[in-house]
Image (cartoon, grey):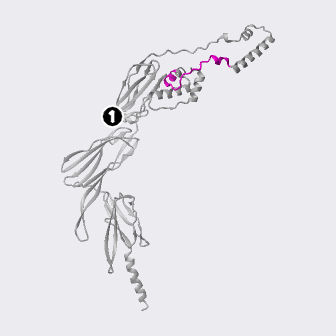
Amino acid sequence: MKNLGKILFILFIIPHAIYAGVVASVNSKEIQLGDMVTYSLDLTGEEISRPNIQNLCGDDVVSTSSSTSIKMINGDYKKSYILSYKFMPKKSCQIESIEVEIDGKTEKTKPIDIVVSKAVASKDADFSLTLSLNKKEVFVGEPFILTLLLKQKDGAEAVDSKYIPPALKGFWRKGESQPTKIKKDGYTITQMMYKIAPQREGVLDISSAQMRIASRSSTRDVWGGFIPNIKWKSYFSNELNVSVKALPSGVKLVGDFSIETELSSAEVNANEAVNITIKVDGDGNLEDIKSFKPYIDGVSVFDEKIVVNNLNLTQKIAFVGDEDFIIPAFSLKFFDLKSKKIKTISTKEIKIKVKNSKPKQELNIKRDDSKIDPIVKEVIVEKGFDKFWLIISFVVGLACGILIMLLKPFSLFKNEKKFNIKDHKLLLVKLLPYKDDLEVKKMLDILENNLYSKEKKELDKKALKEIIKKYEIT
């Protein structure tokens, strides 16, 4: 009788221990790469705080589901909740312990180890992916073809699919073809080609492509019946690498190119724009070609951004001058893959005739002896002039100078009418004779940009006024 109380206490506690708890399980502990794993939590209790699980084994959870069942334990019925999480591990890993709060207590699951083995593609598999290259060794910037083949066995059903292309890190994507399909030997073969070019030298890796296929499947319910379901499986292609060699010294372009120019007009009026379009055609790393904008003394040059479209490159450049000038030849230096030699191609220089141009005027500074004070002039001419009169002349001249500074008599004759600095075309013409001055050159660049480009820049009015005052521009 002494132990009766203990026995009753144990019998009362055990059912509650059984009722509250969490059990973790997986549908398979050993899988092949590309298989989906279902991780399930069987939760039993009255008050359950559902865990927020976003990833397992470092991989994102693809989908979640839940179900409810009734369990009878020792003649008592209890609800049981099953939470399921589907994910696709890419390597062997361990699902760590999960904490769940049930009936005010924190329950923990046991860790589960997952073994992921590399998928071995059989010859008669329903689906397969293959990557191949047309070249194993290339130069930096040299285009080559990466081909993807997807084989689907006739009769293999796919409810849905999702294609994940290879991650082409270290490569430029220059284009890709549309998928093409053919029937051959009991398979539907889909082909897609990528045109890529390496960005740096060394051995560059091309990761595998992935195709996720959804197919119909079925599972048995508790009553032995079949429940239709959708099963996802991922198929991976092989991985590749390519050996990339550096270009010869002094060359940054590789391929086979041609170059030409289109001219709007070879004869324009002064300060009118001459427009040129440069076209480069060919197979190579067009992305590495820099702006063709040249420097021409006395001519303002405006270049637009280079546009690359597949095997074509274009750039537009505008030239504005106030007298005849020559547009120099445009050239390209590249490594030719066929001859394995460095080649240089170029256009011809273009002579531009500018009408109504104003001839340049030379700036001659002459001494005007008429403005020299007669007294001072006499002192300079006569060598033996008396010192007394020399002193008197100096004092008188100094007094006159002070009076001139104070009274400013010449301001009465000064032309108060000035040109409007907001008239950028007139201001450009006024400043052109002084373009050798660095500050004037900066001001001219801003004016030319505002006149012949859509982008407008603000003039530094303070600096402009100093230039006008410096050169006495009216």
Kindly identify the amino acid type of the residue bearing the numbered disc 1: Leu
Residue sitting farthest toward the right: 388
Q: Is residue 428 magenta?
A: yes
Placement of 54 over or under 129, stated as above or below: below
Assess disc 1: are there few (<14), some (14-19) or many (≥20) residues with their C-alpha within 10 Å of its C-alpha: some
Quadrant containing the N terminus in the rendered view: bottom left
Placement of 329 over or under 256, stated as above or below: above
Whether residue 262 is visible to the viewer of this picture, yes or no, is: yes
Q: Which residues are magenta?
A: 408-429
Residue sitting farthest toward the bottom: 1
Whether residue 237 is visible to the viewer of this picture, yes or no, is: no
- The residue located at (76%, 15%) in the rendering is 396
- The residue located at (28%, 49%) in the rendering is 130
Q: Is residue 406 magenta?
A: no
Using the image as rendered, state which of residue 205 and residue 79 is in the foreground: 79
Using the image as rendered, state which of residue 375 and residue 301 is in the foreground: 375
Placement of 99 over or under 454, stated as above or below: below
Residue 422 place in picture, x, y as percent: 52, 26
Residue 325 place in picture, x, y as percent: 45, 19
Residue 74 place in picture, x, y as percent: 33, 80
Q: How many marks?
A: 1
Quadrant containing the C terminus in the rendered view: top right
Placement of 380 over or under 286, stated as above or below: above
Q: Quadrant of residue 304?
A: top left
Residue 289 place in picture, x, y as percent: 40, 33
In the structure shown, which secondary structural element does the residue marked by tag 1 occupy?
loop
User: Mark 1 = which residue?
Assistant: 311
- The residue located at (27%, 53%) in the rendering is 161
Q: Quadrant of residue 416?
A: top right
